[in-house]
Amino acid sequence: MNPVAGARMYRRSAADRRSRAAGTALLGLLLVLLISACGRQREPVFHDEYLAFGTLIDLTLYGVDPARAAQVSDVIDRQFQRWHHDWHAWEPGKLTRLNAALDTLQPVTVDADLRPLLLEANRLARLSDNLYDPVIGKLLALWGFQGDPLPPGTTPDPAAIAAWLAQAPTVEDIRVNGDRFQSRNAGVAYDLGGFAKGYALDRVVEMLRARGIGNAIINAGGNLKAIGAHGARPWHIGIRSPRGSGLLASIDTNGDTSVLTSGDYERLFEVNGKRYPHILDPRTGYPATGTEAVTVVHENAGLADAASTALFVAGPERWLEIARRMGIDRALLVDSHGVIHMTPAMRAIIHMDPAVHAQIRVEGPD
């Protein structure tokens, strides 16, 4: 998932925010928040939306005074816009300036607000055996997943992919000394897709809790983080089927829970009837195969985001191994044959949709 896709940003006026203070969350691209609209609400429900990271971000607060909720939402919106600008992988900003500096193979000082994000991305890459790889920006650009897409009906030049593979950049190519980063590989270019959304969701929850808000859900293009509950009811989250418009399953959650999904249907193009999704396998230079979707549930949204990408690339053969390496016990993978693989811990919390008749395999230790 590329959370920093080039999209126009917008901010609503305060008056418009207040006019939309109550409501239910919209259907996300990958997941949906299902909040019943039946019956009278005993506590106020505040709802707002922003556009950042190339997707619609949906905020719902429960039990917060609407005027105060609108003020908090304004702060969160401004923060999302800063992140969108600073973390963008190809529009001018802090990350693009860093990539240009790393390309010189000389040491570069990294801003204090960007450094923790990069260090955590590097850590998760190592945990995943580099199946989540945050430095494949140049490969993503070859495939047209940064900025302008490829001309219709075309794919990258195989020679260009072979040249990229000859360098095969990983986070091991980056030396970190305090606030100084240095690359030894000219192929390195950070693109924080598959991690930045989750990382941002964790930071937003910190902002909410610092302001005394304990019941909320944030939906960033179908990737969700929930805290607390919806009054006496849990937050009810639906997992979209990777094929078709229906639901695959749902999860009821209380407390601090993140639900992150990577799918082959979010950003893709077709050439001669063949699908080319945006989740690339850094081992081959081509889109990952064998998987339609992965959903990961964890308290840490950044970890869940990177893990969903890594498990997708790992495929049905290695997904359990990578999940164990990353400390993930609640995960679900739909393979390219429609078979649903899930861990025992995931099976214990998930409710399959009655319309789903796929084969289910519960795999891994109890």
Image (cartoon, helix red, strand yellow):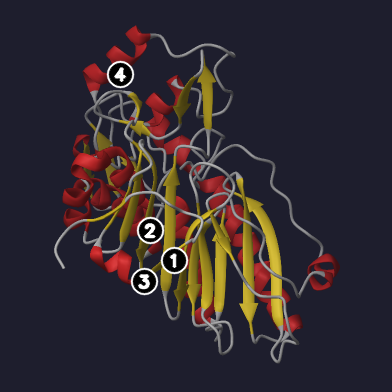
The answer to whether mark 3 and mark 1 are in CB contact below 8 A is: no
Amino acid carrying mark 2 in the image:
Gly
Q: Tell me the residue at 22%/17% (across/down).
A: 166
Q: Which residue is mark 2?
A: 302
- Mark toward the start of the polypeptide (3 vs 1): 1
* Residue 192 position by quadrant: top left
Residue at coordinates 50% horizontally, 62% vertically from top-left?
224
Can residue 59 be seen at all in this image of the molecule? yes
Residue 358 rendering spot, x and y as whole percentages: 39, 49
Q: Secondary structure at mark 3?
A: helix
Q: Foreground residue, 303 or 320? A: 320
Q: Which residue is mark 4?
A: 164
**Mark 2 and mark 4: span between their CA atoms?**
27 Å
Amino acid type assigned to the residue bearing label 4 in the image? Trp
Q: Position of residue 327 (x, y in %)?
A: 21, 61
> Residue 153 occupies which quadrant of the picture?
top right
Distance between the Cα atoms at labels 3 and 1? 22 Å
Q: Nearer the viewer, mark 3 or mark 1?
A: 3
- In the image, what residue type sits under mark 1? Asp
Mark 3–mark 4 Cα distance, whole angstroms, equals: 42 Å
Where the C terminus falls, by quadrant? bottom left
